[in-house]
Image (tube, rainbow, N blue to C red):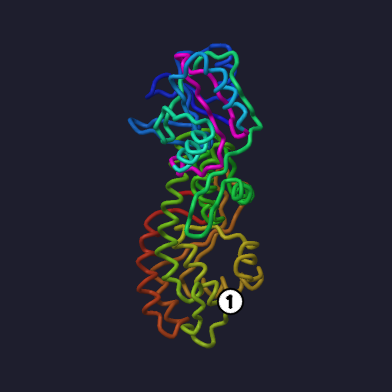
Amino acid sequence: MKISIFKNPDTVETSVEFYQVVNAIKLGKHQNTAFAPSGIISISGKRKNLLIYTGLVLLSFDGILNDEFDGIFQSISKILTTYCCFKNRLGNGINVLIKTDCLDGHHKTAYKQVVEAYENHLGLKVSNNKPDEFTLCPLSYDPNIYYNETSNVFQISIKTKKAIVTEAQLNGLYKEGFDKAVEYTERIVRFGEATWDKFIYTLAINCVKAGIPQVKTLEFVFLNYGYELIFKGKVNNAYKKLGQIEKEGAGALHSLYFKKFSNYKPDVKCDVRVFFEVLIFKSIYAGKPFYYLDKDVVKEVGISRARRETIVKEFIAMGFLKIYNDREEGYVHEVTIYELIPENIPKAAVELMVDASVFLKKVMPLLNSKYRRVAGYSHPP
């Protein structure tokens, strides 16, 4: 696992693998630095940002008498969940690191549970009462440092309204979803020096759609593409933008998403109703123009390519849709792009629906706000 090295409390010097910290302590190197057990940290102005969370909890037991030191050290190292322990810089205490399965954002909960367990087991009081993820630990010199890379993971209970969840239970599913999002994104744009911003933003959009939590998307992005704070900004923007659009837009598309197709005229076929609302939803969700691959149309709404082409021709004739192909820099192949013409949506809705007033009252403000800028389904702004 990677962690940040600090030159001073306000300056990150570099990021290294944890075993490198262990070796430095064993050899007495870099004594003027400190490390952040909680993971990769960046500093923007006076604000610290945790980019990747390790789940490590730091405990310090200070003021240990010389004749008790070895016995306490042995007791700590024998605890199965002890990941690492070593003599502190002053030589009168022991720093202990415990690997947990804690979720990012719940470090204080993990700290309290680990403190309680270790204090009860050792009969000692923890000296550091700083349960935040930005706590630093100075490098010291201890040739006898204890390091168990395969230590047991301390299970943290995080109570939610639904259940008790752990990182171990969810990580595999999230990683699988992230890999699929990467695969889909790479069909549109490749990660490169000229296209990294498009790629990261596009990938974040697809992770939102895959239901991956924002903190996990950030973790996977950093692990796969580097520890750049600007990546975090791209991911945050995607989640903030699409989360709000989804919240506002879902209720507006009441026919499809609430299964109320009776609002349409009887002669309007079901797949026409579905595709009409899907196109509006995609446009509200991602802006203009948006990519919608044929295979995804089949997968998401069950409309074949041939039938989709027929419906598209009808919509073009109605005057509210246009499609075209594009091959932008960095994109893998030519793709079909859909673009709605908002000013013609009301006429189309009236033609398709028995009463389009409620639908248009909710939909049009959202469409108009999105069509002031270029964005896209699986397509960055």
Image coords of residue 167 (percent x, y): 57, 46
Q: Where is 201 relative to 311, above or below?
A: above
Q: Residues within 10 Å of mark 1 (few under 14, many from 20)?
A: some
The magenta region covers 80-108
In the rendered image, which quarter contains the N terminus? top right
Q: Classify residue 24 by image quadrant.
A: top right
Taking the magenta stretch, the answer to whether it contains residue 82 is: yes
Q: Foreground: 298 or 374?
A: 298
The answer to if 100 sits in the magenta stretch is yes
Q: Position of 217 compared to 125: left or right?
A: right
- Residue at screen point 57% across, 18% down: 70
Question: Which residue in the protein does label 1 denote?
Answer: 271
Question: In the depicted view, which residue is nearer to us: 141 or 242?
Answer: 141
> Is residue 182 visible to the viewer in this orientation of the structure?
no
Element carrying mark 1? helix
Residue 296 position, x and y percent, is: 62, 62
Q: Residue furthest bottom?
A: 266
Judge left or right: residue 298 versus residue 16. Answer: right
- Residue 114 position in % (x across, y down): 50, 37
Residue in the foreground of this view, choosing between 146 and 319: 146
In this rendering, does residue 80 appear at all?
A: yes
Instruction: Give the farthest residue toward the left.
Output: 46
Position of 7 compared to 272: left or right? left
Q: Residue at x 44, y 14 (%)?
A: 90
Q: Amino acid at mark 1?
A: Asp
At 56% across and 55% down in the image, what residue appears?
210
